[in-house]
Amino acid sequence: MTSDAGATGGRVLRVNGPLVEVAGLAGVAMAEVVEIGPDRLPGEVVRVRPDRLTTQVYEYTGGVRPGDPATRLGHPLAVPLGPGLLGGVFDGMLRPLSVAPAWLTPQSLRIADDRKWTFVPVATEGMDVAPGAVLGTVDDAGPIAHRVLVPPGVSGRLESIRSAGRCRVDETAATVGGVDVALVEWWPVRRQRPRRDRQESAAPLVTGQRVLDAVFPVAKGGAAAVPGGFGTGKTMLLQQIAKWCDADVIVYVGCGERGNEMADVIAELGELTDPRTGGRLADRTVVVANTSNMPIMAREASIYTGVTVAEFYRDMGYDTVVIADSTSRWAEALREFASRTGALPAEEGYPAELASALAAFYERAGRVVTLGGTEGSVTIVGAVSPPGGDMTEPVTAHTQRFVRSLWTLDRELAYARHYPAVTWVGSFSRDIEALGAWHARNGDPGWARRRRQVVSILAEADRLSALAELVGVGALPGRERMVLLAGRLLREGVLQQSALSDNDAYCGPGKAAALIDLVLDVVRACEERVDAGVPAATVEELDFSPVLRAREDVGRDDADGVRRHRAAMLTRLEELS
């Protein structure tokens, strides 16, 4: 994918920031990559005219001038997929940023990789292999097995395969049907990788965050969005998902964020302990970093690059999660690019194709049967940063149409130190029915009923809170006061979760179910006491701290410990008269 194709005698006509006009290249197609200037800066063709091409360069164009050479590559933007991705930090074109000057030094796409990897063959010569078949593994490419697969579009007799040993990524590992297969594969980032079939059945992505898993879940292969204003805890929630979700590979795309914030995220990922392996969380994470000081086209491409990496590991049979922070900055790059090319602006200056671009991005999520016959998934979680917290602005409004789960962060909850600040008013999950059926098949038939009760209580408590502010709590009937109590216990004892607590940072599904049952059973007992004639004020004065402390007092998966708290609290309520 890096070899020259076609005419090489092009020259630069005009430079206007990242827009560079080129003449002398025949047969060039839209979206094809052209290298500009002596430094071979990559650019994408965005307009084709009879006498010239307009390219959008992915790099800073300082020093490029009319008359400089231009070379076509004959393919759209493609990235190298192979061993060495896990634990690495890359820019939007998947070029390593391991060396500090690489952040700001313009580079070509042609970066030599001299590292050697330990290849172990699995297939044997003479057998017939199809796309997706496993040829071998690379044992030193990270904490999970790196499988070398037959690339899409290649099949036939395995004519030769390399013996076990060390080799570079560009060296031939096998020959299939006359085609040489290396450890590295180049793939266009804007094209979905093929799969055999899409799975219709749903299975939950367990994040370890109770408000998500128990109230607004997302399925493996689904798409979720996290809209929230400044200071509402988006980055912390995304980091918690990255650390605790039951995915095999995390792809963290930092798109358009400030450089110091991105550096902090990378440093924190390096310090976090992976609960699955005991090593560093960064070792099974791929970071695609395109900060706000990097060119807009690289920022725009970074989203697709991240999804392409996730699909690469999905094809190996792994569950992957793409965390995009944030899609708003990506949309701003689209807006800036559209204004430079003279495209007709739509809402708030965004291009008219904003909705279709968002749809194309989130559409690449999915739980599939791979070409090799295994199951894998790509789950996309995109952060949205609406200016001023305006949830009606175009990026947020369009995103809600294309995601299966929406986790809206509320400023008032965040200021009240209620974290995660996911509001139960503006959030939703479209996979409740399918996931409820999954839980019923896997030993928790009460999951859907439990969630339905939680949502109902929270909605009723919000309604009564507004009424109580007008007439006072004392004017409400006892039953309604118990609803207010139930809302408080659910918010503080279940939905709140401390990322800094060893016991509470992660909550297993069994413990989450037990905590909700604890609150529901305690509230039911309180209602029975009120119906029996006990004053509501007497019930409200009871010490409910055992209910609120249960999430902190017991271990991450200790459902039995929660049940002991439940039994003790119900005994105290029975003694109330």
Image: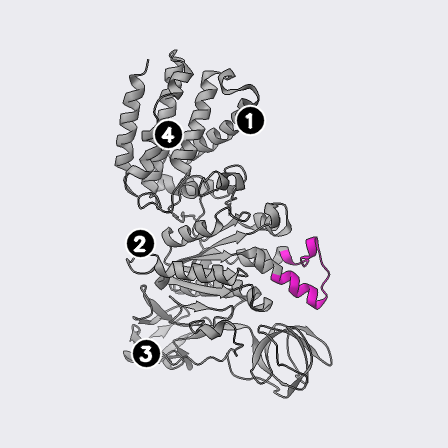
Q: Is residue 50 magenta?
A: no
At 42% from the left and 27% from the top, the residue drawn is 486
First in sequence: mark 2 or mark 1?
A: 2
Q: Check disc 3: other Cα within 10 Å, few if <14, some if 14-19, many if 20+.
A: few
Observer-side mark, 3 or 2, equals 2
Q: Which residue was labeled with disc 2?
A: 275
Q: Are marks 2 and 1 in contact (CB under 8 Å)?
A: no
At 29% from the left and 37% from the top, the residue drawn is 553
Q: Amino acid at mark 4?
A: Val
Q: Check disc 2: other Cα within 10 Å, few if <14, some if 14-19, many if 20+.
A: few
In the image, which disc is placed on residue 466?
1
At 72% from the left and 76% from the top, the residue drawn is 49
Q: Is residue 470 above or below residue 453?
A: above
Q: Horizontal and vertical percent for residue 264?
A: 44, 59
Q: Is residue 545 left or right of residue 4?
A: left
Q: Which residue was labeled with disc 4?
A: 519
- Secondary structure at numbered mark 3: loop
Q: Amino acid at mark 2?
A: Pro
Q: Amino acid at mark 3?
A: Gly
First in sequence: mark 3 or mark 1?
A: 3
Span colored in magenta: 333-354
In the image as oriented, which residue stretches furthest toward the bottom?
Answer: 9
